Image (cartoon, rainbow, N blue to C red):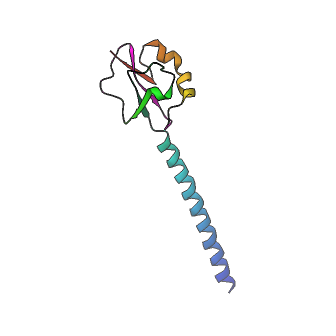
Amino acid sequence: MKKVTESLAKIGAMVLIATGTFAYANANIEQKVNRADNWFEYNQNATDPLSPSSYSPIGNQPSDCEDGNQICAVKTTDSELTEEFLTSIQDELEGNTASEHVVFRN
């Protein structure tokens, strides 16, 4: 009976370890998925590049974004575009030079 109890205790411990390992791995996968690049295209009729409502979510960087002086799209790792993020890249938006977060078009 003692050996059965010890065996059950060991099995229980292994199940707990496996569950914890799976939960940790799953959390890491979710973090990596949530950090994917998200592109938001600037609506050319918009007047405020610091307003999230001036942008529409798109899947990838637009292919027609090349060097130019009009904002084309912005990239963030967040799933939603926020005014806080746009304010943090204000210099890039106003610089008319492509950067890590901003691409322009003619």
- Magenta stretch mostly in which secondary structure? loop
* Residue drawn at (50%, 36%) of the image: 80
In the visual, does 60 lie left or right of 79?
left
* Residue drawn at (30%, 27%) of the image: 63
Residue 100, percent across and down?
Answer: 45, 24
* Residue drawn at (45%, 38%) of the image: 36
Name, please, the residue furthest toward the bottom. 1
Quarter of the figure with the C terminus: top left
Residue 51, percent across and down?
Answer: 51, 25
Quarter of the figure with the N terminus: bottom right
Residue 68, placed above or below residue 18: above
Residue 9, percent across and down?
Answer: 66, 74
Of 23 and 10, the residue lying toward us: 23
Q: Quadrant of residue 70?
A: top left
Of 3 and 90, the residue lying toward us: 90
**Magenta-drawn stretch contains 66:** yes
Region in magenta: 62-80
* Residue drawn at (57%, 62%) of the image: 19
Of 47 and 9, the residue lying toward us: 47
Q: Quadrant of residue 11?
A: bottom right
**Magenta-drawn stretch contains 60:** no
In the visual, does 62 lie left or right of 99?
left
Residue 90, placed above or below residue 23: above
Residue 5, percent across and down?
Answer: 67, 80
Residue 38, placed above or below residue 25: above
Residue 106, placed above or below residue 8: above
